[in-house]
Image (tube, rainbow, N blue to C red):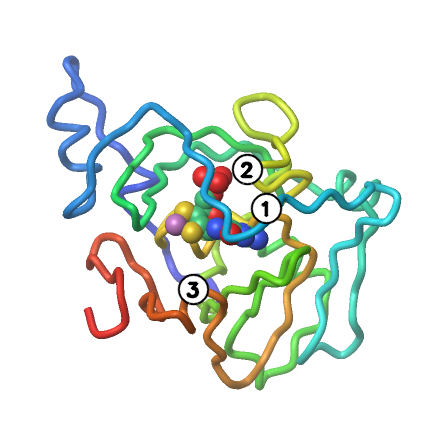
Amino acid sequence: MTQRFVTRGFVGRRRDDGSADIASRTPPGQYITKDFPVLSAGPTPRTPLEQWTFTIQGLVKQPVAWSWQEFLALPSREWTVDISCVTKWTKLDMRWRGVSLDTLLEGAEIDDQAAFVIAWSDGGYTTNLPLPDVLNGQAFVAYEYDGAPLAAEHGGPARLVVPARYFWKSAKWIRGMRLQAEDQPGFWESLGYHNRGDQWREERYGGD
Ligand SMILES: Nc1nc2c(c(=O)[nH]1)N[C@H]1C(S)=C(S)[C@@H](COP(=O)(O)O)O[C@H]1N2
Ligand SMILES: [Mo]
């Protein structure tokens, strides 16, 4: 797959005073904040790094698992992206380091039937994404934020980041991805949040 991929989150136009730029980068109904609030549905899990693995399973020829050391050895890059939470804050130019889902999925031989990714986390959180929505540089697993190891309350040691979706799709404490033929609503999606969650279409709740 080699679709070209562009979103406003990745390609901010720069102006001298920044105001037009900021307006064009603020999704409908959102306000800009410089804070980085913590929003967790439960306690912060603390899996020792020696026990941490990242697994790709489901519709793959062979499940793949990386240890923490192996994960850190994968090709990584910096990502500077805008993030929007369904609680209406948007934070611009958040700087992360992590591994593209393209890189992770290349490590697995994916079955042709695979159409959805279910990300799952320590603590039981899940979120669902169509496979085409996370390919071609659209999603990554981050382990650094703003030049430092990702704080546990923000999902460290590693979290999914999907900048083109509301932040609930960015599963904290991610431990793996299951590839499925069928969609399956995750934690918040089952509780009434929108199944896709595109902030530019203001897809907050089911039915929006
Ligand atoms: N595992 C897990 N991931 C999660 C959540 C959670 O409760 N558990 N909350 C989601 C929601 S609703 C939001 S808005 C963001 C919040 O991330 P932050 O606490 O780093 O701001 O994480 C998302 N990922
Ligand atoms: Mo959220």
Mark 2 residue type? His
Classify mark 2: helix, strand or loop: helix
Left of 45 or right of it: where is 94? left
For image coordinates 43% across by 64% down, the residue present is 188
Residue 154's tag is 2
Q: Position of residue 151 (x, y in %)?
A: 61, 31
> What residue did someone put label 1 on?
159
| Residue 73, above or below 185 | above
CA gap, disc 3 and disc 2: 17 Å
Q: Position of residue 40 (x, y in %)?
A: 50, 47
Q: Quadrant of residue 26?
A: top left
Left of 185 or right of it: where is 164? left
Whichever of labels 2 and 1 marks the residue nearer the N terminus, that label is: 2
For image coordinates 30% across by 50% down, the residue present is 86
Give the number of callouts.
3
> Crowdedness of circle 3 by 10 Å Cα count: few (<14), some, many (20+)?
some
CA gap, disc 2 and disc 1: 8 Å
Classify mark 1: helix, strand or loop: strand
Which-is-in-front pick, marks 1 and 3? 3
> What residue did someone put label 3 on?
188
Which-is-in-front pick, marks 2 and 1? 2
The answer to whether residue 59 of the structure is visible from this angle is yes
- Residue at mark 1: C-beta within 8 A of ligand 1: yes
Q: Quadrant of residue 14?
A: top left
The answer to whether residue 139 of the structure is visible from this angle is no
Classify mark 3: helix, strand or loop: helix
Left of 51 or right of it: where is 204? left
For image coordinates 27% across by 72% down, the residue present is 206
| Residue 66, above or below 37 | below
- Residue at mark 2: C-beta within 8 A of ligand 1: yes
